[in-house]
Amino acid sequence: MRAVGLKAERLGRLVGEDAQLLAAAGWLHDVGYAPAVADTGFHALDGARWLLRQGFPPRLAGLVAHHSCASYEAEVRGMKPDLMAEFPFEESPTSDALWYADMTTGPGFGPTTVMLARAHTALDLGAGHDAVAWHEKACTRDGWRWLAAEHRAGHLVQAARAYLQIDQPARAGRALADAAHLAPDELRHRPHARAVLSEVVRSPHAPVTVIQLAATLGVT
């Protein structure tokens, strides 16, 4: 989310008076993943609804609701009618810039990116075994090493969630430890990462390194 927000800020000069709107959308586009915000499991819609409840402008909520092909995921989930009824789809340079900021942050559209996207979709749909399989396959590819450290850490946090779904807290702990080694701020500042860490440390099988990490970050 941080990398997308920064890129959106840099693109602000291209959208004139919408520069601040674009920056806000970049920073908030994935807020629907936060445990306190997630409701349906469809992060784009959950995030947009939360933004409205918090009093953010409807246009900002609409940009978040439809970012990066969200309508296709909505169709798969059977939620497209709700999405379209609640949030009009905007076709504008600002919307295009948000999509660009999100979808060009990372290694591109190679096989590794596709595998990680499949892992995240499987996780959101509750298919933990599929999510783990795609994640582990992606990590063996050269493209994994080309990802920026913070992106790899973010994916590892998602992998930890998948391991928890299939009742493997020890492996979830190892994924979190690897994420903390790569990019400590991913666990220090992202609420959903701290929530996953909290769940892992409550397990009797939590690795010692993860227990120490939780203590350092004040996570119980």
Image: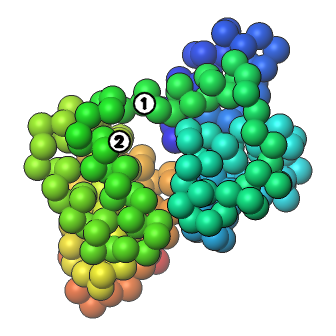
Residue type indicated by callout 2: His
Residue at position x 83%, y 37% in the image? 59
Q: Position of residue 56 (x, y in %)?
A: 84, 45
Q: Position of residue 123 (x, y in %)?
A: 40, 67
Residue at position x 73%, y 55% in the image? 83
Residue type indicated by callout 1: Thr
Q: Position of residue 190 (x, y in %)?
A: 51, 54
N-terminal-most mark, 2 or 1: 1
Density class for disc 2 (Cα within 10 Å; few <14, some 14-19, many ≥20) is many
Which is nearer the eye, 108 or 191? 108
Residue at position x 68%, y 36% in the image? 25
Above or below: residue 196 compared with residue 7: below
Secondary element at tag 1 = loop
- State which quadrant residue 147 falls in: top left
Secondary element at tag 2 = helix
| Distance between mark 2 and mark 1 Cα atoms | 9 Å
Above or below: residue 14 compared with residue 161: above
Density class for disc 1 (Cα within 10 Å; few <14, some 14-19, many ≥20) is some
Q: Which mark is residue 105?
A: 1
Horizontal side of residue 46 vs 215, given as left or right: right
Q: Is residue 177 visible?
A: no
- State which quadrant residue 109 falls in: top left
Residue at position x 63%, y 52% in the image? 44
Outermost residue on the bottom side: it is 204
- Residue under label 2: 151
The reply to whether dot 2 and dot 1 touch (C-beta < 8 Å) is yes
